[in-house]
Amino acid sequence: MHNLLYKMYKILAIESSCDETSAAILSKTAKGLVPLAHVVASQISLHKKTAGVVPEVAARAHIRKIGPVVRKALADAGLKLSDIDYLAVTAGPGLVPSLLVGTEYAKGLAYASGKKLIAENHMLGHLYSAFLQAPNLPLPSMNLIVSGGHTYLIFLEHKGKFKIIGQTVDDAAGEAFDKVAKMLKLPYPGGPEVSRQAEHGKTDFNFPRPMLHAKNYDFSFAGLKTAVLYKIKNDRLDIGNVQTRADLCFSFQNAAVDVLIQKTIRAAKQYGVRAITLSGGVAANKKLRKDLALAAKKAGCQFFVPDFSLCTDNALMIANAAAIRLETGRYRFPKLEKIKVDPNLPLK
Ligand code: KG4
Ligand code: ZN
């Protein structure tokens, strides 16, 4: 068992849960956690051909990239593997073939070097990512995590103690952006393209705000996506028309962002938090960032959203989550053969 609150150490983390191969080195110093290296190899161009991630294709790319990415992280930090104290790797949630590449590689490093390996939860990485740039963010906080696979509203009492108070009952927020993009025949990755098109929207079709008035903090985006589809079909809209497409993106984004913000603010007020954070890939959405920042200020809360490179999948957030895990709990390192990937690893 380890409790490392006062010790200095270095963590090498690996992330390969979906379509980014990433490695990072984080150092615990007297001044706090300092990033020494951060390398991300994106597969976006590869998945453009299939307009989405094919798990086996992603895994093969991870296999090609993982060695060079880890070696570059060590070289960038001017370190050797023997200088590292702990290894960490994303064990889930994510795509099994992708997760397997990272975990098996990390286990290999651990066997070869004798270093201890932390099996980390990808969503915990997103949750704690705000602390990388805002280590003194006031707590408790309300945290909206919006990615391609998950949508969570999490109340964080203090590091190591949190409660999921809302999540999606069907599609994740990013998934809905991606599906609307596909419907409109926009290129992969869909989310950024929908938000780009939305900037030119003029007419708002006033799509429904699913579950906005429900008493809980859960979200639903499948109905909203279907409303876009029915609008196109029933009104015989021409999605080849540039303005029609922009209006559909504009209307969809307005509805999705509206629900995310209203629920987050309501939860923030009910839980009496001091700060609101936004993370996950959809946190790159300009409207969501801007409107949530304004709404948080109005609600008297500090607002923080990490830089774009720390919102999308990356290993630095995994190193950070592992460091927080080590420092806040008495972590029991599992035996290497016991570390298994879990595509649905629960957040707890
Ligand atoms: O967190 P992330 O990089 O990967 C997962 O863990 O899923 O999130 C990726 C998601 C994708 O669905 C992508 O379309 C969405 O984030 N996304 C956006 C924007 N940029 C990325 N969605 C809306 N607006 C954006 N600007
Ligand atoms: Zn993610």
Image (cartoon, rainbow, N blue to C red):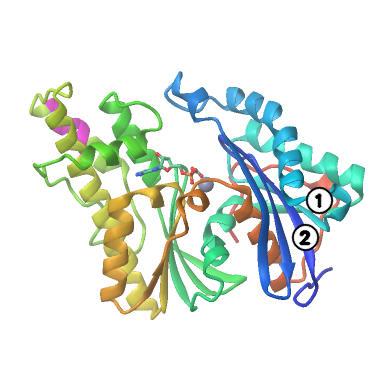
Residue 219 in the image: state x and y as whole percent.
Answer: 34, 54
- Can residue 211 be seen here? The reply is no
- Judge: label 1 CB < 8 Å from ligand 2: no
Q: Nearer the viewer, mark 1 or mark 2?
A: 1
188 within the magenta span: no
Q: Secondary structure at mark 2?
A: strand
Q: Nearer the viewer, residue 236 or 281?
A: 281
Residue 90 in the image: state x and y as whole percent.
Answer: 66, 47
The residue positioned 27% from the left and 56% from the top of the image is: 259
Image: magenta residue range: 227-233
Q: Residues within 10 Å of mark 1 (few under 14, many from 20)?
A: some
Q: Secondary structure at mark 1?
A: loop
For the residues labelled 1 and 2, say whether their Cβ atoms are less than 8 Å apart: yes
Amino acid beneath label 2: Lys
Q: Which disc, if any, is residue 79?
A: 1
Main SS of the magenta part reads helix
Q: Is residue 196 above or below residue 114?
A: above
Q: Nearer the viewer, residue 248 or 172?
A: 248
Residue 134 in the image: state x and y as whole percent.
Answer: 52, 69
The residue positioned 34% from the left and 33% from the top of the image is: 179
The quadrant of the rendering that contains the C terminus is: bottom right
Q: Which disc, if any, is residue 10?
A: 2
- Can residue 182 be seen here? The reply is yes
Left or right relative to 136: residue 15: right
* Residue at the outermost top position: 49
- Judge: label 2 CB < 8 Å from ligand 2: no
Of marks 1 and 2, which one's residue comes earlier in the chain?
Answer: 2
Q: Specify the quadrant of the image occupied by residue 109.
A: top right
